[in-house]
Amino acid sequence: MAKYLVIVESPAKVKTIKKFLGKNYEVVASNGHVRDLPKSQMGIDVENDFEPKYITIRGKGDILAKLRKEVKKADKVYLATDPDREGEAISWHLSKALKLEEKKVYRISFNEITKSAVKASLKEAREIDMNLVNAQQARRVLDRMVGYRISPLLWAKVKRGLSAGRVQSVALRIICDREEEINAFIPEEYWTLDAQFRIPGEKKLLTAKFYGDESGKITIRSKEEMERITGELEGEDYRVLEVKKGERTKKAPLPFTTSTLQQEASKVLNFSTQKTMRLAQQLYEGVDVKGNGTVGLITYLRTDSTRISEEAQQAAEIYIKETFGEKYAATAQIKKADNSNKIQDAHEAIRPSDITRTPAKIKESLNRDQFRLYQLIWNRFTASRMNHAKYETTSVKIGAGIYRFTVSASKIIFDGFLSVYMGDDDEKGKGNVLLKSIDKDTELKWEAFDEKQHFTQPPAHYTEASLVKALEELGIGRPSTYAPTITTILARRYVAKENKNLYVTELGEVVNVMMKEAFPSIVDEHFTANMESLLDSIEDGNINWKMVIANFYPDLDEAVLQAEKELEKVKIEDEVTDVICEHCGRNMVVKYGPHGKFLACPGFPDCRNTKPYLEKTGIACPLCKQEVVIKKTKKGRKYFGCENNPECEFMSWQKPAGITCEKCGSFMVEKGNKIVCSNTQCGHVLDSKKE
């Protein structure tokens, strides 16, 4: 009897897939990659057409020996690694490592681990797609070249254990650029004016917002302007000039891609990108569902397509009609994502493998986090197949002399997809019911004004979710790279994460400045995005992968050699300080470690004394007049504090300017080329002191 061997990547899939196949099939796992470039060297033969030198990954010998035994027994070998570039490359590496040239070898791939999908893939078995493999090889070789040529320069300049990367360095730059924007941001004052009115015959008051005058919208910039407008409004009659009724449609959301799943899971469930991908992997590979055995609950988790298979669309339509009613099912919706030019449409969107397997049905079989993520995916997919929501809107314009106030309300008239999935900005019936009793020319009685001062806010710090969104919009990286990129810059301590926000550390600033000076093209977002589109062209079979490498390497090589020369010129000796080592009496020196600068005794290894390095600013503390020093939080974020801490509690995220605000008496801080009052309610701004 013929014997067939199916090789998958993950041991978790073995159980799930074995269940679907007959006794003639043996299913084994490779545990991911089996071959890679060596860690001890770059592993690319630059002189010999950039040929990669692959070796067996340490610790994979036993797995390969076991696989070879199984291969000998088999008549046919099916390589069933993940359905993407990396999965294709793993299949190719397996065929080389297991010497499968003389065997009947077939590549199969499935987007979901269900019986029908696995069985169908066997009928559509094919050869390994070398375009996919070469696109992955090109990515690996490019990343290796950048990492292994540039990282030693960082070690020489900044000290041990740092790394540069083709995508991670761009991600770091994006975060640094945002930090600079925030630090240079000058808040601008503005005011809002709400008016409360009594409608004849109504007990509740109506609140309207100041809009402007007959000519259009007005932004109130100061208290004086506010006082002038309210003064002019005194004694005016308030009358309804216009009542507009209409309908508004809110479109159903698209199903999840890798990027949108990571963003939504961060926003709604507070999951990191890494945690989201780990849980999604578990749901994809298979979970033990009571009464069903091991079941793959969702489709493949690395995708940038919002496409849905015809079968999934039909199943969703039937389920929605039966559960919610005919009018809820959207039949002929063709949905396309905005960035369709960047999409690799190899996979479907992320969706449940069976829509009838509702979150409630399988809650007992999942742990809390698995359940919450599955529920999010199920709700979003179901909503994406439903009709749009409809609102009835009413907007009212109120006149008072030359000035105008507005009030608007909306009421849901058909909930559509909102019956399943509501985002932050979805509302079930926002607005003021009093609008029903208002008609054109209704006279209103003014009751009170509510005047509020505001200041414009700086751009928000990046979170993992908003960084993923930015990387995707810029075309940097692909679904499989977002989570590892963020994990790397956090692990290297270039970036610290506090309360969801990402902050650049001192170390991150140093590395970013070096990369921008020595390797501007590597950290240029357009260059990196263009490289991604070249990798896509390799996948499509339009470009030879080694040609891409051959065009890239000479420029990198020249930049590295140039930087090495420059670094030799500016080779910095350890900075000697006036702090005396209490163990041996030497003057301590400034060193760089994984957390940034610290003080160390130059007598190492005889004397191993170290201390935190507090860089002096020469500015007196606004509270106690001792010196302000640069400090770091536990996670490495820079701030300014008093050297007399903990006795003095002064701290500021911005550098104090050493002067007091003449308007309110608070200390002032430096922001770009301005000096700004630290009291956000004051808003006093000066030009930077000219030397």
Image (tube, rainbow, N blue to C red):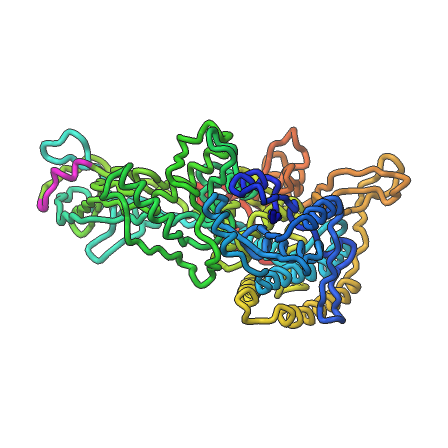
In the image, taking residue 674 as reference, residue 380 lies left or right, namely left
Residue 689 visible, this orientation: no
Query: Picture coordinates of residue 216 (x, y %)?
Result: 24, 56
Tell me if residue 434 is in the magenta stretch: yes
What residue is at 16 percent from the left and 39 percent from the top?
435
Residue placed most toward the observer, 229 or 592: 592
Say which quarter of the image contains residue 453: top left
Vertical comparison of 557 with 477: above or below: below
Which quadrant is the C terminus positioned in?
A: bottom right
Q: Nearer the viewer, residue 175 or 572?
A: 175
Q: Nearer the viewer, residue 190 or 292?
A: 292
Q: Is residue 273 left or right of residue 225?
A: right
Looking at the image, which is closer to me, 523 or 445?
523
- Total numbered labels: 0
Q: Farthest top residue? A: 364
Q: Is residue 204 magenta?
A: no
Look at the image and give the residue range highlighted in magenta. Answer: 433-441
Query: Residue 282's quadrant in the figure?
Result: top right
Q: Kindly identify the residue that appears in the image at 59 percent across and 52 percent down.
A: 78
Residue 383 against residue 335 in the figure, above or below: above
Q: Residue drawn 68% across and 48% down?
A: 73
Report the side of 379 relative to 48 (left or right): left
In the displayed structure, would residue 583 be above or below residue 147? above
Q: Is residue 462 visible?
A: yes
- Residue 659: give x, y in percent of width and height: 56, 45
* Image position, residue 217 (x, y; %): 26, 54
Residue 552 in percent (x, y) is at 65, 69
